[in-house]
Image (cartoon, helix red, strand yellow):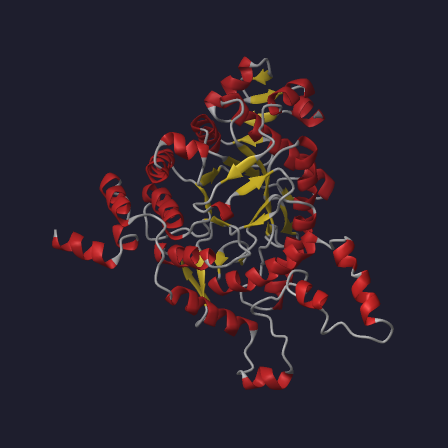
Amino acid sequence: MMVLEEVGFEVREPEAFELFKKIGATVDEKRRVVRLNEKTVRDLISSVPPQVTLYGKEEKHNLTLGCGNVYFGTGGTALNILDYDSNQRRPARLKDLIDIVRIVDQLENIHFMLLPTYPNELPVNDIDINRFLAGLCFTSKHVMGGVYTRDGINDVIEMAEKIAGSPEALRKRPILSMIACGISPLRLDQKYGAFIIHLARKSIPIAVPVEPLCGATAPASLAGTLVIQNCDGLIHIMLSQLANPGAPVIYGSVATSINFQDMSYLGAPVESGLLNAATAQLAQFYGFPYYSTAGISDSKTLDAQCGYETAINNLLVTLAGGDLIHDAAGLMEFALTVSKEKLVIDNDILGMVYRAYKGIKVNKDTLALETIRSAGPGGNFVAQRHTRNHMHKEHYHPPLSNREKREIWLQDGGKSIAEKANEKVNELISQPSRFYIDQKLIGSLVQSFPKIRAEHFLGENNIRERKVK
């Protein structure tokens, strides 16, 4: 609060600057700096909804943030795909994004689809509608994504209204949400400031994460970075409420540190996990829904580093209660690359992390006193009914992990976790595509939005019909 009042923050978006002026902020017109006292800040953030529900197309995929739940999702937006066969990265295409969506749709521990790759073959004006349609078409999980143009935002909202059935239906059950990432330190960017105003007025759920970097755009100390993180987060939250009091907004963090050897960005230092875990506590203090970050690896290949960085940071942020954890699966190489195999491996990791989050349930049944009496001194519990009842409920069994004796593992080919993940990826992609939007509606969307790459979204029969016409 001292920083917001004494140092202030720069506002580059003209309408945002005027909105802050209207509430009596102290402003420096020349430097475009705004200063707010604590009472004003607290008044502005008081209208933030304490809970936001992000809907899937199926009830089981609804995500309610701000009530103690934790959900895992993908994240990005990465420019590259790691090709398993060559172990080299290549530019991501729209087909890769569709494959990723189809894979995630079948992975139980990844709860939402944050569009994780950028289709490099598309012009920027065509990116938004094709990315969001890929998500809405090929998964029943909630779809979230960053946005790139004002026209693209409008196209996506209009498309989603048609898919939902009406504008009212989309607002009542938002099957998509958007991200407007802020610029640290202490600055409201012109482009994303305008996006926040626009989306808040459209009442589309919006995450407003900020990304302070320890030692670069924030102090080198973690506590100092948290000051910048919280100031920047509050600035963007306040703008959403100035634009539309009560707008569904999600406080967010992508905080991390830099490599102090060459001052480059890092995605996976343990300090990132600590910062995002601490920000979970800040979100809980204010009563905000929280968009958090964990799970990136800075490794360039599917090795031990790739696993331990993902596991450690996911565990830290989960145990702190990070509501919506994006980047939790699939990302590597400083968030520049997505691996389809890593998605499958991370599904195992997230199952273990979530088991740790659920903790140990203690009640009359789980204490098992009668079963202990029945087994008695020197007895065993293998054949007990209590064991049969609890062996699956209490214990997580990661699908890819090998828990067999060496002889059996060798008989099965002695495969590494990466090899097994590649087999699983091929199995999932080889399944017939499941469409979550009726083909007639997709055909109508293609007619309404010429930017849509129809060949990726229409079934074979529809494509043949279009060619005949």
Looking at the image, residue 45 lies above or below residue 259: above
Residue furthest left in the image? 469
Kindly identify the residue that appears in the image at 50 percent across and 59 percent down: 107
* Left or right of 253 in this view: 366: right
Q: Position of residue 288 (x, y in %)?
A: 62, 33
Q: Position of residue 131 (x, y in %)?
A: 38, 47
Kindly identify the residue that appears in the image at 56 percent across and 75 percent down: 416
Residue furthest right in the image? 377
* Left or right of 319 in this view: 61: left
Count of labels in the image: 0
Residue sitting nearer the eye, 191 or 230:
230
Where on the picture, by quarter, is residue 174?
top left
Looking at the image, residue 151 lies above or below residue 245: below
Q: Position of residue 230 (x, y in %)?
A: 65, 34
Residue sitting nearer the eye, 313 or 436:
436
Looking at the image, residue 428 lies above or below residue 201: below
Kindly identify the residue that appears in the image at 49 percent across and 55 percent down: 336
* Left or right of 175 in this view: 154: left
Q: Is the N terminus in the top left, top right, bottom left or bottom right quadrant?
A: top right
Kindly identify the residue that appears in the image at 43 percent across and 49 percent down: 140
Q: Position of residue 279 (x, y in %)?
A: 67, 40
Q: Is residue 219 visible?
A: no
* Left or right of 185 in this view: 435: left
Where on the picture, by quarter, is residue 404?
bottom right
Residue sitting nearer the eye, 90 or 33:
90
Q: Is residue 452 visible?
A: yes
